[in-house]
Amino acid sequence: MPDSVRVAILGATGAVGAELIQLLEERNFEVADLKLLASPRSAGSTLNFRGEALPVEAVDDNSFEDIDIVLASAGGSTSKAWLPKAVAAGAVAIDNSSAFRMAPNVPLIVPEINPEAAATHQGIIANPNCTTILMGVAIYPLHQVQPIQRVVVATYQSASGAGARAMEEVKVQSRAILDGKEPEANIFPYPLAFNLFPHNTPINEQGYCEEEMKMLNETRKIFDAPDLRVSATCIRVPVLRAHSESVNLEFESPFAVEKAREILSAAPGVKLVEDWQANYFPMPLEATGRDEVLVGRIRQDLSHPCGLELWLSGDQIRKGAALNAVQIAELLVKKNLLNASKTVVSA
Ligand code: A2P
């Protein structure tokens, strides 16, 4: 294991890239050398790390020489094009895109849930979908006590999931509307400011969009629960960077609300936020910039004796993406897993 780690960030100029840089600094990750990679559009610009302006380079065939860990957040096609090359050059890649998530030889990891899966990596480790990570952190502690049979979830997803330009678009649209002008939509298919719409990923024959299917398939893989039933409805809302979710859980037998509350108040990565008198529960503005998933409104489902309801908010860019990836990198260093045998996987 290297004494300190040579890191490359692929997608350094994006919303998640910026957070990755900040987290490496904030968490004192033992970075020996940081390489910032993006598209040719960004070559020549600089970004700050530990008080130093580092150049952003266009990714190319030589980018991954002498790199131990690649943190990638530049979209699926960029990951597919570059990560096998990074692995062939000797790096371990932690990928934020969906390109490799369901590949059987790629572990899909939320460190609070399945850190042991890291030991099986063959060069690429996938960071799950953001809504899936946030829900998983909140419900896995209950699943460990009594296996969840079925999840019905509705999401309220922020603009940040579609990147930095989408966040900017919502601000510009909001300003336009307040000025009495027509809002323009370029990144999203419709104006998001003062609006909401179902997640704009392709819809399958059963009527579920890709984001909703990710919540089903990825939760099954992370929990190692191939029979878990999940039905999701994913909605984009005009919030900048924290997702919220309304989650209904069905167990085989009743799960006492008090017990759920006790478990979640001690669960890793979770902060219980509940003041029933004040009607104060998790909110995306309060989740913004925080590491924990805020969970509250835990209550008995009136429609089912074995059901529980809960509500959560979590920072989509942090725990939903960059923080989870950095935690995986920390796990690799701690468990001495940077030199595991590597095979180049295809998506
Ligand atoms: P660039 O800024 O040069 O376009 P976000 O998710 O916030 O939109 O960010 C996407 C990130 O992925 C940016 O850093 C972007 O770089 C990078 N990116 C997009 N396409 C490519 C590509 N073809 N090669 C390398 N990086 C890319």
Image (tube, rainbow, N blue to C red):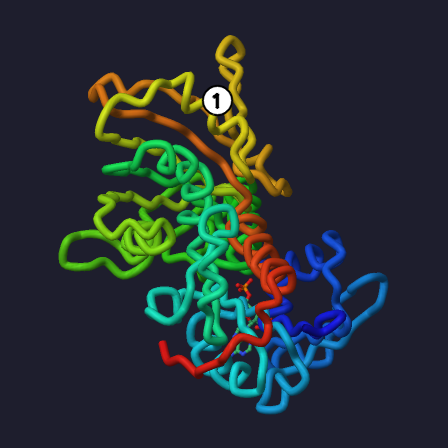
Is 146 situated left or right of 22 in this image?
A: left
Q: Residue furthest left?
A: 205
Q: Is residue 301 visible?
A: yes
Tell me what residue is drawn at x 22 percent, y 19 percent: 305
Tell me what residue is drawn at x 44 percent, y 82 percent: 343
Q: Which of these two is toward me, 191 or 225?
A: 225
Q: How many marks?
A: 1
Tell me what residue is drawn at x 77 percent, y 72 percent: 32
The answer to which quarter of the image holds residue 148 is top left
Q: Residue furthest top?
A: 277
185 over 153 or under it: above or below: below
78 over 134 or under it: above or below: below
Tell me what residue is drawn at x 53 percent, y 55 percent: 321
The quadrant of the picture occupied by the C terminus is: bottom left
Q: Quadrant of ligand 1?
A: bottom right
The answer to which quarter of the image holds residue 11 is bottom right
- Image coordinates of residue 296 in percent, x first then y, are 47, 25
Is 25 situated left or right of 91 in this image?
A: right
Q: Residue furthest bottom?
A: 61
190 over 31 or under it: above or below: above
Q: Amino acid at mark 1?
A: Glu
Residue marked by disc 1: 262
How would you rate the neighbour count of disc 1 (Cα within 10 Å): few for under 14, some for 14-19, many for 20 or more? Answer: few
Q: Which of these two is toward me, 99 or 138?
A: 138
Q: Which of these two is toward me, 283 or 254?
A: 254
